[in-house]
Amino acid sequence: MLRVFALSSFLVLLSACGTDESQSPTKNQENANQAVQQEQPAQPKQGTENEGIAKQEQAEPQVQAISEEPVLEAVEAEQTMPVVETDQKSPTIGEMHWPGANSYCTFFKEGHKFDFDNKETWKFVFVTILDDSKDTAYMQINNKREKIKLVNATKSETNEKRVYEVAADKNIQIEVEMNSGKSGVEHTNYTGVIRLLKPMGGDAIKFYGDCGV
């Protein structure tokens, strides 16, 4: 009876051991896999990583290189632009040598010494002639004696301004500013300035003289 019970117990124990041994490889493998997964760092998903990079690139400001080509082209165009030379010059006022002029108004350049008996001193910057129209005068412009015509005049008690234009070239206008001084029975002394109005930036000259007979 004891042997039968012992044998039965042995068989039961043997059966239990066989069951554990048949299941142990699978459990051991699962445990090993879990250990490996815990040791390995989590790998990010490829799709999520790419989306993050794309969003970062969109967020970063795009720096565009400034092209120097337009600046270089402008500099080259300026360097190659032809220089236009012009012969146009501002007119100049000079002295007329006019001995024996039958003048009514005779104005001399400031500082000039006139001697009636010395014909070399008969040099004027502005002259009106008795026999001519009162609107006509003469000046030396660009080394040439020019007839000038009165186009406008304003007058006050001691000051008079006359505007003339060259008869042969109406693009040249002259202003004669006359300040009256001592007066006699038939004459009045003047000082003033003759200046070119057109073209702008022309010559100007101070004068003294008189008008009368």
Image: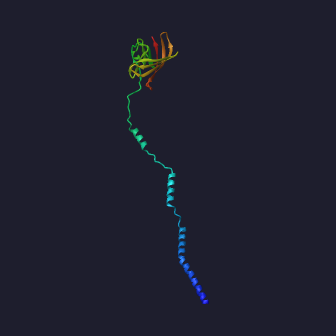
Q: Residue at x 56, y 81 (%)?
A: 17
Give the x, y percent position of residue 46.
49, 60
Q: Is residue 94 above or below residue 13?
A: above
- Name the one closer to the observer, 197 or 119: 197
Quadrant hosting residue 34? bottom right
Is any part of residue 110 visible from this angle? no
Quadrant hosting residue 104? top left
Give the x, y percent position of residue 182.
51, 14
Image quarter in which the C terminus is found: top left
Q: Residue furthest top?
A: 185
Q: Is residue 103 above or below residue 26?
A: above
Image quarter in which the N terminus is found: bottom right
The figure's colour scheme reads rainbow
Give the x, y percent position of residue 206.
46, 21
- Name the one closer to the observer, 48 or 161: 48
- Name the one closer to the observer, 19 or 145: 19
Is any part of residue 54 visible from this angle? yes
Q: Residue at x 48, y 13 (%)?
A: 188
Q: Is residue 173 left or right of residue 2?
A: left
- Name the one closer to the observer, 95 or 174: 174
Q: Residue at x 59, y 88 (%)?
A: 4
